[in-house]
Amino acid sequence: MQITSPDFKDNARIALQDVGLQKALGNVKTGFPHKRAAAIARLPEFEQLRDEARDLKNHIIEHLDLYLEAFEAKVLENGGHVHWCRTADEARQTILKICQDKQARTVTKGKSMVTEEINLNEYLEANGVTPVETDLGEYILQLRGEHPSHIIAPAIHLNLEDVSETFHAHHHKPKSMDPAVLMQEAREELRTKFVAADVGITGANFLVAETGSSIIVTNEGNGDLTQTLPKTHIVVTSIEKVVPTLEDMTLFLRLLARSATGQEFTVYNTLSTGPRRPGDQDGPEDYHVVLVDNGRSDMIASELREMLRCIRCAACMNHCPVYGAIGGHSYGWVYPGPMGSVLTPQMIGIEQAALLPNASTFCGKCESVCPVRIPLPKLMRHWRRDEFEKHLTPGAARWGLGVWSFVARRPALYRQLTRIGSRVLRSLAGKKGRISKLPLASGWTDGREMPAPSGKTFMQQWQEQQKARQSS
Amino acid sequence: MKPNNNPPVIGLFITCLADLYRPEVGFATIKLLEQAGCRVEVPEQQTCCGQPAFNSGDFSTSADIARQTIAALDGYAYVVAPSGSCISMLHHYPELFDDQDPWKARAESLKARAYEITSFLVDVLHAELPNQPYSGTVTYHDSCSGLRELGIKQQPRQLLAQLEGVELKEMEESETCCGFGGTFCVKYPDISNRMVSNKTDNIVNAGAKTLLGGDLGCLLNMAGKLQRQGHAVEVRHVVEVLAGMTDQPALGETQSSIKAG
Ligand code: SF4
């Protein structure tokens, strides 16, 4: 997928003016947060579960190698295969090779952000394998040639009218605005694809070391068909998804469902543990797990380590006022919102992604809802530091900061300049008490008035008072 | 208030925005502290808390400013500022120093002594305010750093509730960011503008005469937007009302601009 993160500001400006998008974003801002709040209110121990989940994730990351090896051993024991892929490219090639070995022509896909991250669809297509997205949102996006704008609700940027038009154009059926009719259409289209697919690819929400299982949680059940009908099932996932036991998994499932959609539990929680055994009624003949690193093990040794706790619930973006204003596509790559502003620079480089970790007021709402307590503002600040230290900060901002810090470190000079500043601002404001246009601060005054200082600086007044007191 | 023979000495951290834009906020803070039996000093060597450098990733300048501020505020029983955001920054100072660095311990000591004014009055002093002549409806914006880093939510409301003439009309989403964010509002003006517009919608819908808050950055942002949109809601720092210092015009207004309407 094309990276447009360097154009973040332009993307955002366009998004802010996009009436349809703004309407669709209304659902994110109110729907998800309210449902989450209601679900949490029904679970008094929620905060305690967050602590447990944070601690458990920290433990797992500390011993990631052990748990991954234990997981691999179990998968092999169950008759499956495990592929370790250091980079996105290795992962793509590995998956293509499996498809080619099976002479696969079409693959069905469950929803998976890791396959977005490694740009799998385009690669498969370029190599003669047709991927078919089976998650309803992803299916709609595939027809439209778009990418997800949200990690759990990929088509959240669209309205019913958009879906209706897209289906009308591709399914050649009468246009409908009835969600049930549209759903039925998609179902019929997809049913034939499910049966015809040679390979099914799914992601994984968690990998369980104790049993060698992977689990996907969905609300549509499409993932089940994707992983049981084709002869070959490939799980494409990333290394930090492993948890020690089934019991541990349930802790995360409880947090995930509530944080993501406000459900107590997601509708379908489907475990898969290797290929079909003798006597099994269904299941794939071949079972592969592709474990993608793609920069994650570098994060273990860095300040970004805490980001590896992420369980991809999307609460951070659902509650983010910046995401809520501009939507996911503005961020210009796979992962949007606060979690994306931390991950994207790691994956595509800070040079291209520097605008993302800067696009935050550090209001801290994301951290306050994150089920595994990731300090997202702190991690965004880590990238700002990296940007500053690599001299990537834009010239004007760096210069301004330099002047400001020179003055701020010299209290006497600072006093004098603030006195002058106060006087200048007051005279610009005149009798009105505020400034409507200030060339050097047009970012401010284009959208709002700038209230002027109400009088001499506090320090000046204070010192004058002290002097008057001493002399009296 | 009982006479106190050994009043705690408070170092006032005025904050750069109150110093420059709203000196009244400093005097109101001093008045509140003195009413509660404290003695207040204003250390000369303070400038800004360093947050602009910290949030721009310039950690070395942040550490320089932290050292300057720590030294300036040494020796005070408590350090109080009329800002949750600046006090949060003071609470970040320990992160700027290695464990072996002697400044680390001094930063920790400052962190333990540094309070935002409303939380200091309520949580430390359990202050009872003398009644004030102010009367009218107010709505309250919870600024992000104070709310989420320092847990300031009930404190200003408890204090306002002590004033007989004040009626609090809560707005929708009082905890949602106003889009100020320090340098954010000039780096990303379009997004900031949308966020502050959402905010002013909620403020206006609350139907209160006055918007109050505990952080001047946010208040300047919201006042500027309300005025650009032509709304009559006046904007003040909460300490102005608590200290009964509402004679002077609200933010961005003058005697003549009030008359001119
Ligand atoms: S960072 Fe936290 S809130 Fe955001 S997706 Fe990950 S787990 Fe969820």
Image (cartoon, coloured by chain):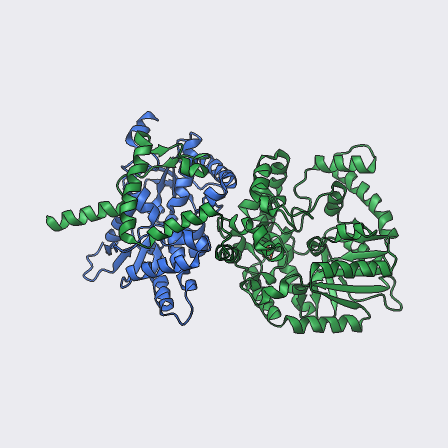
**What shade does chain B have?**
blue
Answer whether residue A38 is visible to the viewer in this image: no
Q: Quadrant of residue A294?
A: bottom right
* A402 relative to B14 in the view: left or right: right
Quarter of the displayed picture in which ligand 1 can be seen: bottom right
Answer whether residue A339 is visible to the viewer in this image: yes
* A97 relative to B23 in the view: left or right: right
> Residue at point 30% right, 30% down?
A431
Considering every residue shown, the one lying at the far top of the view is B260
Q: Position of residue B144 (x, y in %)?
A: 45, 50
- Total labels drawn: 0
Q: Position of residue A281 (x, y in %)?
A: 88, 62
Q: Position of residue B150 (x, y in %)?
A: 42, 56
Instruction: State the green chain.
Output: A
> Residue at point 73% right, 44% down?
A141
Q: Position of residue B256 (x, y in %)?
A: 29, 28
Vertical position of residue A393 compared to residue A248: above or below: above
Considering every residue shown, the one lying at the far left of the view is A472
* A72 relative to A310 in the view: left or right: right
* Front residue of A354 and B116: A354
Vertical position of residue B229 compared to residue A218: above or below: above
* Front residue of A437 and A318: A437
Q: Quadrant of residue A288?
A: bottom right
